[in-house]
Amino acid sequence: MPPGGSRRRRGGEHVNGDVERLQAALGITVSDASLLRLALTHRSHAFEAGGLPTNERLEFLGDAVLGIVVTDQIYRRFPDASEGRLAKIRAAAVNTHSLAEVARVLDIGEQVLLGRGEEQSGGRDKDSILADTMEAVLGAVYLDAGLDAAASLIDRLFHDVLTDIAMRRASLDYKTSLQELTAAEMATLPVYVLSEQGPDHDKRFTAVVSVAGGELGRGVGRSKKEAEQAAAQMAYGELRRRLAVVSAPTGEGA
């Protein structure tokens, strides 16, 4: 395989780095397809391919573009929210978990170019890789077509996320929400275990939250707080689902 070449997965169904497929998923056509190709190039693949450029600069740019666009959207969408509330809404909308979920909808995990090590360790479904690649894609769209095009794409991709936040009307502090739920329903409190990876300038934290000895959620973030909130968000949703199943009527006596 030539450096930077596409790799076909088992069965020939997916081609890593397939820019046309990514454009179809995004619903756009870019002028410079090489930007999207670069956005899909994880550093592990770039290193193995002999030092190709990576998507990290595009990720840096995309993070900033996403931040300003989502900030503008929530400022207009929540006119009565305080500054603190707006900050919580933004954090919930653009955290690693939310970004990774949007990336999964677009099937980015099947298209990102990874090195052998990341491939074998399940990198295609790692929240951190999916989130970083999603940001890089947004950075590529911004460079190719400008802020208006990037904002339009972000509005479509994150519409459901923001709608969910608007409809939930619950605390956006998932750690507090999870603690209140476990205390009320299980008479216990969640326990968090943190680990960190990466160099000091690009540290990533992973939080695992357990309740009554069983893991309920796992989250990744650029800070300990973000990782714990992402883990709590996953655990809160999972626990609510389990409690709903337990309390659902069985149909007996109907």
Image (tube, rainbow, N blue to C red):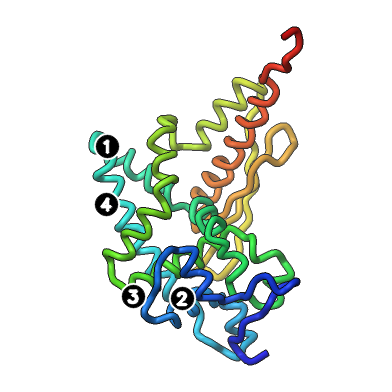
- Identify which amino acid the numbered label 2 is placed on: Leu
What is the CA distance from the residue labelled 2 to the residue labelled 4? 25 Å
* Side (left or right) of 243 relative to 72: right
Of labels 2 and 4, the one closer to you: 2
Residue at disc 2, secondary structure: helix
Q: CA distance from mark 2 to mark 1?
A: 37 Å
Q: Identify the residue shown where x is 61% and y is 24%.
A: 183
Identity of the amino acid at label 3? Leu
Q: Please tell me how crowded label 2 is: few (under 14), some (14-19), or many (20+) other residues with Cα within 10 Å.
A: many
Between tags 1 and 4, which lies in front?
A: 4
Q: Which residue is mark 4?
A: 72
Q: Amino acid at mark 1?
A: Ser
**Which residue in the structure is indicated by mark 1?**
82
Disc ID at residue 36:
2
Q: Quadrant of residue 128?
A: bottom right
Do the CB atoms of the residues marked 2 and 3 lie less than 8 Å apart? Answer: no
